[in-house]
Image (cartoon, coloured by chain):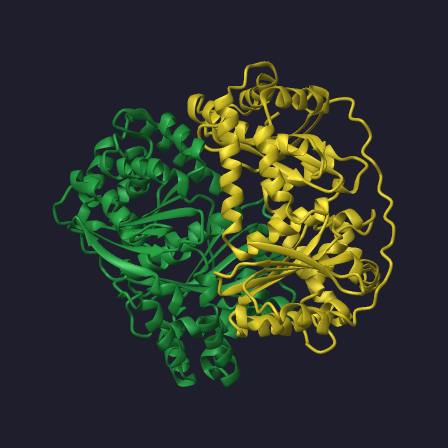
Amino acid sequence: MINIMDNTEYFEINGIKGALINRDDIESITVSILIKGGNSLDYFSKSGVASLTSTLINKGIKGMSAMEIADKLDSMGTSFLSTTGKDAVFINLWTLKENFKKSMNLLKKFIIEPSFPTDEIEREKEKTLSSLFQKLDSPADLSSYVFEKYIYENHPYGNLPTPESISNIQREDIVSFYNNYYRKSNLFIVFAGNLNLKEVKRELTDFDNLNNNPTNIKNIPEVEELKNNRIILFNKPDAMQSQIRYGFTSIKRKNENYESLKVANYILGGGGFSSRLLLKVRSEAGLTYSISSSIKANLYGGKFVISSFTKHDTTVKALELSEKVLKDFIKTGVTDRELGDAISYYTGNIPLSLETPADIAYKVLYSELYSLGKNHIKEEMEKIRKVKPEDIKDVSRSFLNKDKRLITIVGNYDKLKKNINDFGEPEIIDKIF
Amino acid sequence: MNIKKTTLENGLDIILIKNRFSESFSFQLWVKAGSRNEETSKTGLSHMLEHMMFKGSKNFGPQKHAQIIQANGGELNAFTSNDKTVFYDNMSSDKLETAVKLEADRFINLSLDEKEFLPEREVVYEERRLRTDNSPYGKAIEMLFALSFIAHPYHWPVIGWSSDIENWSIEDIRDYYKKWYNPQNVFIVLSGNYNDTEAIPLIKKYFGRWRKQDVPKLRISKEPEQEGERLSTINMDVKIPFVFASYIIPEYSSEDSPVFDIIEKILSGGESSRIYKELVYNERLALSAGGGVYSFKDYGLFFTYGLQNKEKNIMILKDKLLNLIENLKNSKIDSIEIEKAKNQLKAEIVEKTEKNFSMGMLVGDSYFYTGELEYYKKLLDRYSMIKESEIKDVLSRYFSRDKRNIVMILAKGDK
């Protein structure tokens, strides 16, 4: 671990902050960029602006059409991907070293001078719209979408695109998002591969043309606790099994208990075959192929969710058993053995989780986004090593023991109605937008 | 990267791939048996046995293997395909003995306890519902294979037909394990960084006692010559209808096989490829469209697909998708287009060499399908020699209309 991070050099060149991860044993170079500000900055009526903006930055630059750009990238075997999360945009470029200069020239233009052609905007809007309807064909995706919508409700983290919000988006919304957030002061760029700082410096001089004004990211309220117990059942008459999500809102990433909760979650449901949920619900009861729990902690709050699926007639049984495992976990805490195994998983996993330069680049961007500091990986491991059984008990009682929870199910209501009321009265929906 | 092979006295091959810059390794066990080794009415056994490999062996109880690997910071899993079943443990370099010891125990002394088998059969059934019965895409792929192969075992799904899953017994699994899990039908790949002087002695220490056994001869039906287009339409509650089309192509090790990789890139390698450019970009008929190559031991399957954009017409999309393949046969293929395909394939191979797991997969596939450790390097040379005339020749031999198979997933009520 120490060796891996020793090769990481932080810099501020020409007003741009970033890091260089030097690896001279590989033939490729990865460039990853963080732009702070994500979907949560969209207005409800225009959800999708942040995502569309990042999707469109490589769909037209000065003197080059979207297809010419695609042709150039494909010709080099260079891959380019932008993804937009709740708090930020992540841009990733992977290229062979021999094509680095040409690929980098394109990447710089995507960031500095995207042209956002109207026909490309329409094309991407149309694709986004179809993708939304495609979710309805996939029970797993649909279930996650329904859960995400209801868990955050009116909070900006619940800003999910809908056909209506997509059709409301105009070119000026995209240009405005770009102008407000794609700024020097708001970028963090990581280079990983066989490169030196001099080469990086040369590449960054071109960013002179990028907006140099300070960035004002609007304040977002913290995520609140759920106010009601709810079961939302999306009726999909052709479903062959139930897709279940169970959870509540949770902490933000900067919470001092984050590491303890992360370890607790590993033992409860995040640790695959080492987790209690998988052991009880899959291995012993044979109710599902997969069950896991996760904590998603963002800048202003997050969620805890147990995800699973099972056939219709065992849906209530799976829910009851999952809830029992959760309650027992809160009540009894963890054994020394479980805790020791979880800690050694995280500490021992570092060489694997940071195997490629792209893995390290992502960690560096993650630390930057959540202001975790340059020594975040080392410090996080220190904190994890110090977690005690009583810490797990404390965080479980504070953050996993909630009166109010949200359950979303995508399944066939006719097959579920006989038993589901035993668990609570569901709100039946058959539309999500 | 240094790649070498050694064989234990019991016939177990060990492939070592050394990456001295890494701090971890991927320890992989490749069983040369998959759904191809099954028979009608017992489909899915290979995959079910893969599940049972996690349910306890002589010295480690159910789930213990996984729990120990994870408690040592490792990651593990397994997958079953039509030809092979692969198990892997990825760990930091100092943990090799842990991985070797655990794998040897389950490969030599698997418990196969009925008490563990029965709930696990339900788990697998649930997996089938997830991936196939409850997924329009899973259903389409299952149908595409069933339609394309009518005699060869590639006809049936790796996970098995539902009625077979219901009827498997623990005896079926025991027979399969006895038959196919033996040192001459398995090979090991160790990819990454490890102690050079310790690796082989360690593997020998734990796997050396595995008794040598003859590998049964497998009799497999050959696929009869296809004499006409086959079409299947499935009506489901889908908002986005889609189409798949396939052609049977030769096996992985065939001289023609790399040509299909080039064809696949020309048709669907990136947003400037023919299919994407025409159907998604220019015509805006498709939400997404592309293709791929399944490359197997006895045959391969080349496929293309298109997901209809909202409010567009699936029949027009289908016709245009099929026309693009016809056009490729009849129109000029620019040398720049071919060069682009080669560059993409090179980049993909380089990317795979940068991770111990994918490097192990690359060499494992090379060895499994061709008997050569570094076939992937030869592949790069082979790609570089492919010209338009060879592509045209291959297209004309394999991509005729009467060898085409089409699966359409339509909305309810649509025809």
- The answer to whether B293 is drawn above or below residue B158 in the figure is above
Q: Residue at x 43, y 74 (%)?
A: A263
Q: Residue at x 51, y 21 (%)?
A: B335
Seen in the image, is B101 located left or right of residue B75? right
Residue A83's x, y, as percent? 36, 46
Residue B76's x, y, as percent? 58, 63
Residue B296's x, y, as percent? 70, 41
Q: Residue at x 32, y 33 (%)?
A: A167
Residue A374 in view of the camera: yes
- The answer to whether A191 is drawn above or below residue A54 in the figure is below
Q: Nearer the viewer, residue A344 or A361?
A: A361
Q: Quadrant of residue B7?
A: bottom right
In the figure, what tint was chain B given? yellow
In the figure, what tint was chain A given? green
Q: Nearer the viewer, residue B205 or A236?
A: B205
> In this view, which residue lies farthest toward the left?
A213
Residue A359's x, y, as percent? 41, 56
Q: Nearer the viewer, residue B286 or A101?
A: A101
- The answer to whether A387 is drawn above or below residue B388 in the figure is below
Q: How many marks?
A: 0
Image quarter in which the N terminus of chain B is found: bottom right
Image quarter in which the C terminus of chain B is found: top right
Residue B410 in view of the camera: no
Q: Quadrant of residue B327?
A: top right
Q: Residue at x 29, y 64 (%)?
A: A224
Q: Nearer the viewer, residue B339 or A296?
A: B339
Seen in the image, is A42 located left or right of residue A302? left
Q: Quadrant of residue A390?
A: bottom left
